[in-house]
Amino acid sequence: MKQGSLQLGVAPPANRGISILDLFLRLVAIFGTLASAIAMATTNQTLPFVSQFVRFRAKFNDLPSFTFFVVASSIVSVYLILSLALSILHIAKANAVNTRFLLLFLDTAAMGLLMAGSAAATAIVQLAHDGNNKVNWFAICQQYNDFCKRVSGSLIGSYAGVVVLILLILLSGVALSRR
């Protein structure tokens, strides 16, 4: 075989590098989305009031936006885990154009879902931190400090997942344009 020719079924070096980067970014996105879903789902804090028998408790599922965030992050995490198989396929095969289009479409949908969940939770976290004096909603983060810190940290992981999904979408576009 000549030096400049390509073998059938083996990814060219440039596309193989893109596919390896795709796999790595998927692993990073899995970590970010799964960690943020777990952190949010396990967030709760109890405060004593006047006596030990009367307590106030804050849990993530007290607010529907946080529940939506956990569900959205979990769905995206499961999708990313399942998409690892196609990402590995792209490392091995150069002619897998249809699956690259499929990943491009599904990555875009996953990014939209994750962004919607993150935005909904961010609105509630902003209210928890700052309150809204016009409607007499008071900031609760002075009392539930640990709860707010954990929820805010969960949002950081989720937004990191959104950024990685955007990079994956761009990477798929580059890989498809090289064909």
Image (cartoon, rainbow, N blue to C red):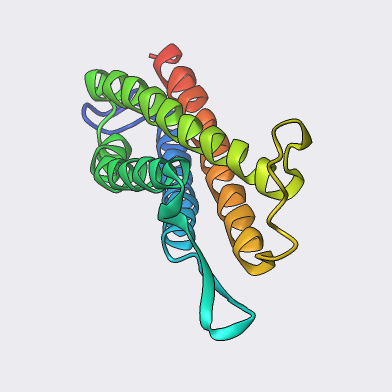
Which image quarter holds the N terminus?
A: top left
Left or right of 154, for residue 142: right
Depth check, front residue: 104 or 176: 104
User: Which residue sits at x=38%, y=31%?
Assistant: 110
Task: Give the percent coordinates (x, y) of residue 78.
Answer: 28, 47
Quadrant location, the C terminus: top left
Counting from the top left corner in percent of width and height, residue 88 is at: 29, 43
Q: Classify 75 as above or below 110.
A: below
Dividing the picture into quadrants, the one containing residue 2 is: top left
Query: Does the image show residue 4?
Result: no
Q: Is residue 113 left or right of residue 75?
A: right
Viewer-nearest residue: 32 or 119: 119
Residue 118 visible somewhere in the drawing: yes
| Residue sitting at x 49%, y 64% | 43
Task: Give the percent coordinates (x, y) of residue 115.
Answer: 50, 31
Q: Quadrant of residue 176?
A: top left
